[in-house]
Image (cartoon, helix red, strand yellow):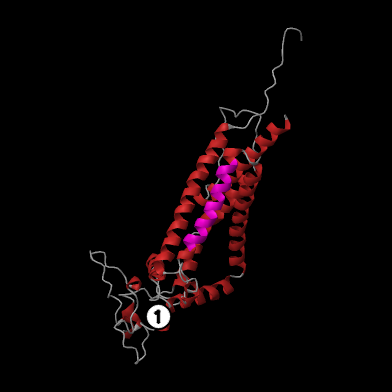
């Protein structure tokens, strides 16, 4: 109509999403660098960095690997997301989204395989714990990890306290001169709430008692069974996490129509925070890539 002009708004990159993704990944990048630095520092204190062969000398699992691997992955992801958002680099943003999505699907596949092959997983977990029981005194980090697991799940050994016969310091053979002979680590003990000071000798000679007498002083259930029970108790929460993630992935996201102020907020299952952060990061990166492509299409 004469006298009226139509105004066309050229597409632009959303500053809010861009700088939120940038800030989100700055924190992620910093945490990853911190984890990696802690892992490398721990290896330096153990002399691993000057003697790489020491990595294979430990009979059990070295918990420092968790810091190094997790820190390395977080650093790479944080770098890609941070620089990709700041420089509007679609390659880095796509790499960030694909890498994060791959991690999520690996977690999902691990959960499914663990459910399908649960007997095999149980045997492997039993073997893994027993191997680490043997190396309990060989590495302080491994020792702390085992103590934490036994205290958290109120358990002792892979299948029970007698698994500590596998350790040269705790076995009940007559040739064992250790004071810890026929005992268990203090993390197996039933804690007395009235005790202010931790009794690290509470497990001495405890396996010389009858099984019924042991139950009053130490946890007699194995960590494999307690871990399975913990998974079953949290099955609803974990399943809710996956359902929530699936709904977030398939739910269409309107871009052109403004939200109805009178409409109630959508109700979605609340997944665990790590899953939420993964999907949230993927959505932000994909939206930013779409905005960048729309802007470039008008050049």
Where residue 21 appears, as percent x and y from the top left, is 55, 40
Helix, strand or loop at label 1? It is: helix
- Residue nearest the observer in this picture, 227 or 31: 31
- Residue nearest the observer in this picture, 196 or 52: 52
Q: Is residue 241 magenta?
A: no
**If the image is split into quadrants, where does the C terminus sit?**
top right
- Pick out the residue farthest to the front: 50
The answer to whether any part of residue 161 appears in the image is: yes
Where residue 256 appears, as percent x and y from the top left, is 66, 29
Give the residue displayed 69% in from the left and 36% down from the top. 293
- Residue nearest the observer in this picture, 115 or 22: 22
The image shows a total of numbered marks equal to 1
What residue did someone put label 1 on? 164
Where residue 244 appears, as percent x and y from the top left, is 58, 48
Q: Is residue 67 magenta?
A: yes
Q: Is residue 178 left or right of residue 17?
A: left
Q: Is residue 133 left or right of residue 78?
A: left
| Residue 185 position by quadrant | bottom left
Where residue 196 appears, as percent x and y from the top left, is 23, 64
Instruction: Give above or below for 75 relative to 224.
Output: above
Q: Is residue 124 left or right of residue 190?
A: right
Is the residue marked by circle 1 packed among few (<14), some (14-19), or many (20+) residues within 10 Å? many
Give the residue displayed 38% in from the left and 70% down from the top. 140
Q: Which residues, given as a range, are shown in magenta?
A: 66-84
Main SS of the magenta part reads: helix
- Residue nearest the observer in this picture, 209 or 177: 177
């Amino acid at each position: 109509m004469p006298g009226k002009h139509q105004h066309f708004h050229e597409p632009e990159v959303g500053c809010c999403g861009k700088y939120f993704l940038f800030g989100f990944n700055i924190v992620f990048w910093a945490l990853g660098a911190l984890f990696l630095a802690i892992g490398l520092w721990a290896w330096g204190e153990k002399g691993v960095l000057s003697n790489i062969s020491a990595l294979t000398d430990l009979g059990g699992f070295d918990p420092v690997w968790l810091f190094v691997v997790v820190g390395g992955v977080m650093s790479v992801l944080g770098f890609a997301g941070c620089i990709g958002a700041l420089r509007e680099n679609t390659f880095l943003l796509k790499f960030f989204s694909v890498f994060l999505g791959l991690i999520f699907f690996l977690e999902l596949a691990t959960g499914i395989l663990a459910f399908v092959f649960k007997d095999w997983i149980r045997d492997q977990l039993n073997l893994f714990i027993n191997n680490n029981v043997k190396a309990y005194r060989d590495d302080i980090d491994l020792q702390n990890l085992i103590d934490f697991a036994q205290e958290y799940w109120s358990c002792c050994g892979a299948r029970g306290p007698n698994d500590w016969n596998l350790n040269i310091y705790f076995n009940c053979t007559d040739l064992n001169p250790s004071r810890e002979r026929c005992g268990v680590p203090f993390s197996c003990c039933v804690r007395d709430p009235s005790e202010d000071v931790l009794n690290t000798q509470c497990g001495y000679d405890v396996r010389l008692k009858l099984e019924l007498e042991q139950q009053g002083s130490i946890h007699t259930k194995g960590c494999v069974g307690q871990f399975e029970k913990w998974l079953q108790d949290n099955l609803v929460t974990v399943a809710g996490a996956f359902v929530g993630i699936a709904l977030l992935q398939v739910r269409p996201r309107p871009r052109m129509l403004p939200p109805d102020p009178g409409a109630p907020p959508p109700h979605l299952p609340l997944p665990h925070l790590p899953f939420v952060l993964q999907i949230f990061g993927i959505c932000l990166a994909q939206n930013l890539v779409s905005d960048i492509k729309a802007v470039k299409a008008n050049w």
